Image: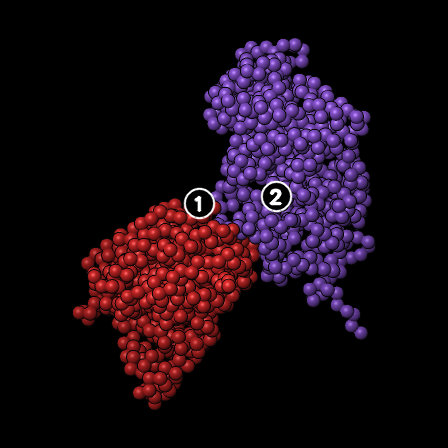
Chain colours: A purple, B red
Amino acid sequence: MHINEMLADAEKTGQPSFSFEYFPPKTTQGVHNLYDRMERMYNFGPKFIDITWGAGGTIAELTCEMVVQAQTYFGLETCMHLTCTDMGEGKVNDALQKAYKAGCTNILALRGDPPREKEKWTATEGGFQYARDLVQHIRKKYGNHFDIGVAGYPEGCDDNRDEDQLLDHLKEKVDMGATFIVTQMFYDADNFVRWVGKVRDRGITIPIVPGIMPIATYASFLRRAKHMNCKIPEHFMAALEPVKNDDHAVRELGKTLVADMCRKILAAGIVHLHFYTMNLAQATRMVLEELDWMPTDNRPRKQALPWKQSLGLGRREEDVRPAFWRNRGKSYVTRTQEWDEFPNGRWGDSRSPAFGELDAYGIGLTGTNESNRKKWGEPKSIQDIASLFVRYVEQDLDSLPWSEAPLTSEADSIKQDLIDLNKRGLLTINSQPAVNGVKSNHPVHGWGPPNGYVYQKAYLELLVSPEVLQQILPRIHDHPDLSYYAVTKTGSLKTNAPSEGPNAVTWGVFPGKEIVQPTIVESISFLAWKDEAFRLGVDWAHCHESGTPSRALIDEIMNDWYLINIVNNDFHQPRTIFELFQGLTVKGLNEEVIVPPTETNGVQAEALD
Amino acid sequence: MHINEMLADAEKTGQPSFSFEYFPPKTTQGVHNLYDRMERMYNFGPKFIDITWGAGGTIAELTCEMVVQAQTYFGLETCMHLTCTDMGEGKVNDALQKAYKAGCTNILALRGDPPREKEKWTATEGGFQYARDLVQHIRKKYGNHFDIGVAGYPEGCDDNRDEDQLLDHLKEKVDMGATFIVTQMFYDADNFVRWVGKVRDRGITIPIVPGIMPIATYASFLRRAKHMNCKIPEHFMAALEPVKNDDHAVRELGKTLVADMCRKILAAGIVHLHFYTMNLAQATRMVLEELDWMPTDNRPRKQALPWKQSLGLGRREEDVRPAFWRNRGKSYVTRTQEWDEFPNGRWGDSRSPAFGELDAYGIGLTGTNESNRKKWGEPKSIQDIASLFVRYVEQDLDSLPWSEAPLTSEADSIKQDLIDLNKRGLLTINSQPAVNGVKSNHPVHGWGPPNGYVYQKAYLELLVSPEVLQQILPRIHDHPDLSYYAVTKTGSLKTNAPSEGPNAVTWGVFPGKEIVQPTIVESISFLAWKDEAFRLGVDWAHCHESGTPSRALIDEIMNDWYLINIVNNDFHQPRTIFELFQGLTVKGLNEEVIVPPTETNGVQAEALD
């Protein structure tokens, strides 16, 4: 989506919006941490994010990678920065093509700082001299595919303090095809408002987005202001100087000062603020809280669908996914990245095209063997493994081989049931409670446009021993509302599904629309997921040395047990899917054996005298 | 669907089934009456029907027309008879092609009786000598497209009483590709069972369908038995002869005799009975009741979708239709008969392809001007017209220009509201009540497979005066759950629909399936319906002489009023759509004027002193 469309939206609805800027970190661990933070900050609700250009080699590659990550996996609209520094036309084209392929539709075209070793900026041989040349090149090569932003300097730029000359340059960039302006950081709101007037006087009508730098510490505040030649208003200094050694006080005062500045800017008719986060969450969050713009609870950001949409190229229309990858969204996007179209036909490419091979995309357990052993210990019995699963459901453990993130609040209503199953060695790796038509703005289960109703069929996916499977299948077959798919690592599929077609397990009814059916259960994708699920288990086994009891135990489970998913098609009945397992416990657990179910739906019969 | 598949189904489920045979009537009125009867008898639940071949000219054409009618409009699987009598290869091919195009997949291949003027059967020049030649020809020309039935003679045939020779002929027909056998009428069950044994001894394994002739009157019973050389068992004569002059007693005894015979046949392993109805309903219905095979109530036959599916060529997969033609199914099928595919894309051809022009297909008001004036009188005021609509809703009138059939029990829950609207000159021409998830076997609203839940959004379509429209639109715009389309005869479309896409107004959730969404509301088809709706009104006006008050009145309504449809997207609220009209009455009705609504949802405010 073009940034201009988002700004027009904010203008139309009168609902101010904001965006975040991140830069490529220098270390792998830094990148990892930043991805975590970006994902958390997604829930603050930015309209888009910027990734700055890491001029030169690996760090430029990283910018492109971060754009892919944000667009494709986090579903965040992204604006990629691009500079002329050290960039020949070939490198520029390469970066643009990568942005295009990632589904990115916004570029901020900059001249850039001089390379570190040089004092003064000079153009690269065969490269671009000015940002306006870069704008012109992008416009020529990609037509209107990209919205193109350019920098604005309300307080002059590094090597030029002449406001009129800078406004001439700005006009040239706009004439070459720029469609929005992002300013350098500033703290002087009055000067900014004055400068906007001058920009408009030049006949420049494209949107202006002010760049806001929240205050984290006194030292960094001064350093950055100095680096950017940014004027610090007296009342900022007067407030902050006295508490400069108290980081907490600086942040508290800083958020008020910056929020006040933001209010002044908004009062002047600006509808969108761009935050220079410096890759940190706290200072920005505090300003948003002060402006009362933060979501009022810790719930995930309200989404159009019950899963996070990818904004990768061609994926914006994707509206259906199998339920199986709920806790491994990135893997799903990766394994389907070669698909031509979303959706393709009624259920789209969730079925017809092949899923990417595990090895081709490096799908498997992440983390080192050592760190995984640290996380999940060295289980020596099914009891140990069951305990791990129980701890995950109790939110005492942040991940399992099959779940990258902690259990969400969606599971609250079935948490006790899940604990109960896992305690008995019935290892749940995915689930959703039944939802019989709650409003689409429901705090936990809601998704999609307002004034709708959303529904879910109860869903349960487990690893079960062959003995348990043998007990479970007749019970499922006896029940008109239950359908299942079960399979071993190498075995063939068992199912009672009435047709080849998909079973919609999540759907929503909205005003003036067809029924939206974003989550399905069906065979082809389940078989693709099966390979992944068992692979994750085998990878876990291989975190342990050959010959160790843990290795043998997990390997045995992967070789012998079944992966089964069960849907209760009667979404009015939230309990049935759990009652199904009544009286069952895995052999070897607490020395107990499987208790055969009685006739009365598994409830143990009283002994008869 | 092939008859063999239906028989295999009956075999598998152990649920005996039956079929009806009709012949082409001699007069237009006779055809009209038979169509009515066929549609009523559809609700008895026959698996298929046979249409006999009307040898020669117009009557042969009529057979083909009846096949089209049954397949395409009634959604009845049909078996078309075809005889060698008077038929050259060209005529046979022509008939086969018509059957093919009608979506018919079953042919009963017969030699046929000699033409009336001849005593003995002779082949037509360039035609076929024996039924076996006809079987061979169909098989050669159409491969396995048609299931091909042939006649079996448990009591010998007209010009051949030699059982062994007839069995030789039967074997020849089977060897040429026949796939099922329908027997001539008989009353001797024991002989039939014996004969089946002989057929099986010949190595003939294809299904045998016994032809059953219910007893209507004593005279016709004797005449037909004699005509077919059919042996009448002694106990039939002993029972019927004494009461031969009492038609009622004959039918009562006859149904018991025939039902007993049917039970004997079923006990011998036969799963399907074919009834020679002689184009009459009563005698057949009585036998079905005696066998306890009749649906236990007067409700329409349980259907896979909320509307009657067409079995026309390429239409079997059709699963979505606009709501507008609910009371004019035949017109919808006619206007979409040139479409290539059902469905085509998500909502299928209900949107993309053009709808057939009214004139090209003779869409308009049926009945003569005189008969229509008799039905609907000569209205001289809006009051008169409102009264007609009220009588229709009160089921005191069987049809209106916009509704071919009486109001169904589906409207029971909103009947009083509809009467109330029409009394105030708000002329309702289509409606459905809100349904918030009742079981799919619900006696009134249910459809589709068992163990599902079905839903409906409240829907109302009316003719309203411009003044009423003016009052209504602001109320709709103020309501977040209501969407509408409104248009005059020649005007442009007004709507508040949030998107171009269709609004699903009926849907069902079934085990292991995607959500089925068979009824929609959207703009393109509404505009096609609009032409038809106003055309029906203009046709009605033209039932009255030019210059008469009725002509002027109806013409005026057609020229000035709006056709509006309204959907309440909140299907939890059954009342809102009616509350919308509170306080509104059409000008000129009872000399009342429109009472402007108060702020409190249209309820009249108390007068203030």
Extreme front residue here?
B609
Q: Quadrant of the N terminus of chain B?
A: bottom left
User: Which element type, helix, strand or loop, lies under badge 2?
Assistant: loop
Chain for disc number 2? A
Residue drawn at point x = 61 percent, y = 16 percent: A157
Residue drawn at point x = 73 percent, y = 21 percent: A222
Question: How would you rate the neighbour count of disc 1 (Cα within 10 Å): few for under 14, some for 14-19, many for 20 or more?
Answer: few
Q: Is residue A330 left or right of residue B6?
A: right
Residue drawn at point x = 39 percent, y = 72 percent: B195
Q: Is residue B252 left or right of residue A103?
A: left
| Amino acid type, residue under disc 2 in the picture | Lys
* Front-lying residue, A497 or B110: A497
Question: Is B23 situated above or below A507?
Answer: below
Residue B182 can be seen, yes or no: no
Please tell me in which quadrant of the rendered image residue B94 appears.
bottom left
**Same chain shared by disc 2 and disc 1:** no
Q: Are marks 2 and 1 in contact (CB under 8 Å)?
A: no
Q: Is residue B465 left or right of residue A173?
A: left
Residue drawn at point x = 73 percent, y = 28 percent: A216
Q: Which mark is residue A302?
A: 2
- Residue bearing mark 1: B500
